[in-house]
Amino acid sequence: MKDHLERRMTTTDLNRMTARNVQVYYGQNHALKDVDVDILDKTVTAFIGPSGCGKSTFLRCLNRMNDTIQGARVEGQILLEGEDIYDRRVDPVQLRAKVGMVFQKPNPFPKSVYDNVAYGPRIHGLARSKAELDQIVESSLRRAALWNEVKDRLAAPGTGLSGGQQQRLCIARAVATNPEVLLMDEPCSALDPIATAQVEELIDELRANFSVVIVTHSMQQAARVSQKTAFFHLGHLVEYGDTTQIFTKPRDPRTEAYITGRIG
Amino acid sequence: MTAPTRSLLVADARTKARNRAEARFRAYGLAAILLSVTLLGILLASILSNGLSAFRQTEITIPVTLDAAAVDKGGKGDLSSLRATSATAYGKLIAKALKDELARQSIPTAGLSDKDIAALISEQAGADLRNRVLGDPRLVGQTVTVDALATGRIDGYFKGRVTLESAEKDSKIKPEQLHLADAMRDAGMMALRFNSGFLTNPDASEKRPEAAGLGVAIAGSLYMMIVVLGLSLPIGVAAAVYLEEFAPKNRFTDLIEVNIANLAAVPSIVFGILGLAAFINFAGLPRSAPLVGGLVLTLMTLPRIIIPARAALKAVPPSIRDAALGIGASKMQSVFHHVLPLAAPGILTGMIIGLAQALGETAPLLLIGMVAFVRDMPGLPPGGFLDPATALPVQVYNWTQRADPAFTERASGAIIVLLAFLLIMNAAAILLRRRFERRW
């Protein structure tokens, strides 16, 4: 496992997103405390930790999906390319075009495969002509490694695909708006091992163009796909560092306990 | 020590009791369904047996010579002078033609005066012929074949409502007249035909049930449904979308929610009083107008549309909203592009049920004057929305109040038309539902 981890090197250290001193409250409940994380460019960052530790909450802070939850409140600073995404002048709609999201359960729209992918570019006005839109749809489906499977049935409903295909369709839909950061909330938890392997391979390829943040329950998955890992426990960011370091020489005893299976 | 094991092949007492309870429950359910199906069957059978005959009407076919001296009293041959001739004069012309025709076919009329013979023909026949001539003045001087309505009693005789025994005690008909009617039928002068007038004619007075039709009521109901659909669909759906998707969840919206549920339970006659006060007395809209009826029914229907529409919106999985928001759709785009289309089947079903209730509503319409006797068809939209009209259920109510048994048949016929409208609306709802559901 060690060799495998060491082969993966971070290609760049440019910061895409920076989170400093982030606090999240759900009503009176202080769900996330003092989180400092850097999301690097062209890097897969994994958030691991036991259920209820706040990793999904933090992920949803990064594209302000927490705004839709009643009573959720975020404090601290999260910067995207140096701009505070919680600034009053920021429209979350524009932010979400730059920070795409893939959810735990595949949730394609009950529309055709084509319309699923074309929806984002359409509402953001990214294509000026039908040909251009076709081009975006094709390239997005290719990036999501789905093109060869669906190119003959673009008009078929997206909900008719298999679970793994649906999730890759959701990834294609997310990359179609050409985001800078791609957030994935346990994207493989509803998939079988083969579909999981396909999606993991895809995540590795997506790293070439996007910075990817993935929340996962599976430490093996984090080790397989990520270069950076953040370990959350009970609302605290316990440890953040290179995946190799986290899995081989954890600094915090809680991290060690979790990755060796003693807590969690 | 272990308990003695029981064989699986023998059911124990608890299991038997449980199975008996289930069997009893199934029997209750089946009995309830059978009872309701039987009662529904009886209801439908009684309405159909009473009402289907309203769609057929006895007509007397005779040639009538439109003598210029008789029909053109002004003598100038133009429309204004033709108008001077009354329907009564045409009635006399038809009566004379009938007498001549009977003589020509040598049908015996013993024991009947000229007045008795003329009484076979409805008072409406003269008015119908006058309208025909006014519509085509070239008919003056020619001999035309007239299908004159027979009076209600003769019509009832052919439909089995009037018998020779009942005619003995009836001041309005003599058994001899019925014998004459039999002879005329045998001669091919009198027959039951399809009664298209039932669907197109306006209401008629107590004295001529044979001429009464549903035309004004159908037009009024149709106009009202257009108003109800046009107002309550957009307002109801918009209100449901706002309350469900956009409104903050606080005390105030809770209060609104409770009050919408309360409004759905308010007796419809209260909405009639509101409509009378607000639309007629305050806003000064005319009485008996389909627009006012439609507005009142809209008020009544709105809460009944909002509640199922909200339920349908609530049933759309939140993952769809997340998906839309996650790729940068605005709240409005996520609702109108994704949530609303998915909720459409449920919203439509609620809409149609609301409309069907509105179509069958009588009480509020009585208060705003749609119970009036209206002879003239309302005009074409948009002006027709302000013309006086009545409504199908009100017409049923009206006809059941009348003394002549011929109106009982017509009331049942009107119920059949009302039911047919409801069936068409429900079928439309099912079709639309299927169409939208395929998009899942």
Image: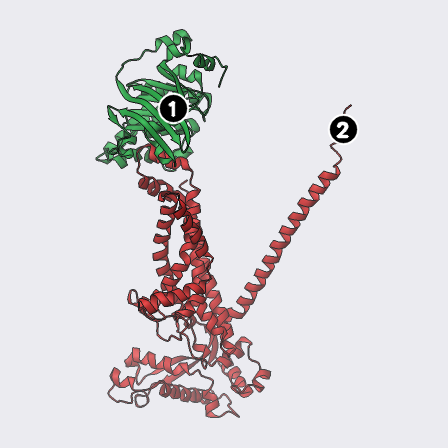
* Eye-nearest disc, 1 or 2: 1
Q: Quadrant of residue A111?
A: top left
| Secondary structure at numbered mark 1 | strand
Q: Position of residue B417 (x, y in %)?
A: 46, 65
Rendered-image quadrant of the N terminus of chain B: top right
Asked whether the viewer can see residue B429, the reply is no
- Is B357 displayed left or right of B284 in the figure? right
Q: Quadrant of residue B379?
A: bottom left
Instruction: Determine the chain carrying the residue at label 2.
Output: B
Q: Position of residue A221 (x, y in %)?
A: 42, 17
Which residue is identified by label 2? B5
Chain coloured green here: A
Chain coloured red here: B
Which residue is identified by label 1? A33
Asked whether the viewer can see residue A195, the reply is yes
User: Which residue is found at the position 47% from the left and 74% from the top?
Assistant: B399
Judged from this view, the residue extending furthest toward the front is A28
- Is B157 displayed left or right of B358 in the figure? right
Which amino acid type is shown beneath numbered disc 2? Thr
The front one of B146 and B361 is B361
